[in-house]
Image (tube, rainbow, N blue to C red):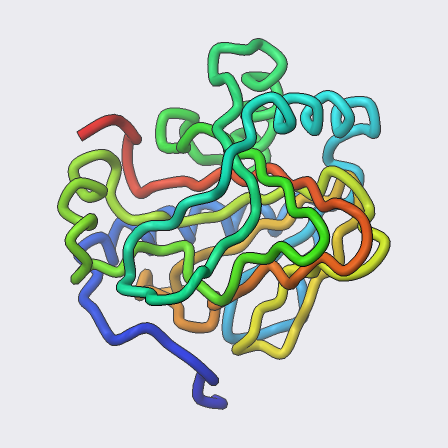
Amino acid sequence: MTEPLKSYPPCPNPDQAAMKAVGDRVRERLAHDPSIQRLPCEQAEIWAAADFVTPGECERLMAMIDRTAEPSQILDHGYNEVWRTSYSGNVDAADTFVQMIERRIDDLMGIPHEWGETMQGQRYEPGQEFREHMDWFWTKAPYYKQEARRGGQRSFTAMIYLNDVEEGGETAFLNLAMSVPPQRGVLLIWNNGTVDGSLNQFTLHAGTPVISGTKYIITKWYRTRKWGHG
């Protein structure tokens, strides 16, 4: 196996057994869904589904993002540079339309709704990006104790592209030498762990700079147990 190009410092994963169990559940469910395609890589589990949301649903979600978007923030990994220059904001979890989209993702993956964080909308304008990062939590970071109390490790990521982008804005998995271009309505799912539940360094990814146009996405992260405020 090729060594990762870039990685976080090693850290333990107290939720390894739980991440393995979630991974087993999702893998089995997606394997029997003809609408899902497993992307061709061995080092990480990544799936895609075309036309997961309709054009009309995309437009409605983009309008919601425009109403809530503020300059994006990231959890502190000790970066001394600007790492994320997009706009983002949680959509209204009480909105019945949002609940319908979330339930559709829950049902596809077979993960309890209560394990999912509130969906976050993100907007990238020309020149904006999210540099290389992991979605799983670095367990040696100061923030991890709080995250452990309110749902544990991030096991899975589900992301929906809401529009086509004229140029740029790919989701680049840097350690896999693989990029996925924005395509309206496409759902992208990846396991943040390995088959045995370890934290997967090969899920390092970046939202590459938008060159022309505007990029809209919705992201939903799932934990290893019920998500809440710790």
Left or right: 125, with 9 as reference point:
right
Residue at the bottom extreme of this rendering? 2
Going 21% across and 61% down the picture, which residue do you hit? Answer: 13
Q: Position of residue 126 (x, y in %)?
A: 72, 53
Q: In the displayed structure, would residue 134 be above or below residue 183?
A: below
Q: Position of residue 44 (x, y in %)?
A: 51, 68
Q: In the displayed structure, would residue 128 be above or below residue 11?
A: above
Going 18% across and 66% down the picture, which residue do you hit? Answer: 12
Of residues 181 and 71, the one drawn nearer to the viewer in this rendering: 71
Q: Position of residue 167 (x, y in %)?
A: 82, 59
Of residues 166 and 49, the one drawn nearer to the viewer in this rendering: 166
Going 49% across and 46% down the picture, which residue do you hit? Answer: 26
Residue 166 picture quarter: bottom right
Quarter that holds the C terminus: top left
Left or right: 53, with 140 as reference point:
right
Q: In the displayed structure, would residue 2 be above or below residue 115?
A: below
Q: How many marks?
A: 0
Q: In the displayed structure, would residue 21 be above or below residue 133?
A: above
Of residues 72 and 161, the one drawn nearer to the viewer in this rendering: 72
Going 78% across and 26% down the picture, which residue do you hit? Answer: 59
Q: Position of residue 113 (x, y in %)?
A: 43, 26
Left or right: 56, with 48 as reference point:
right
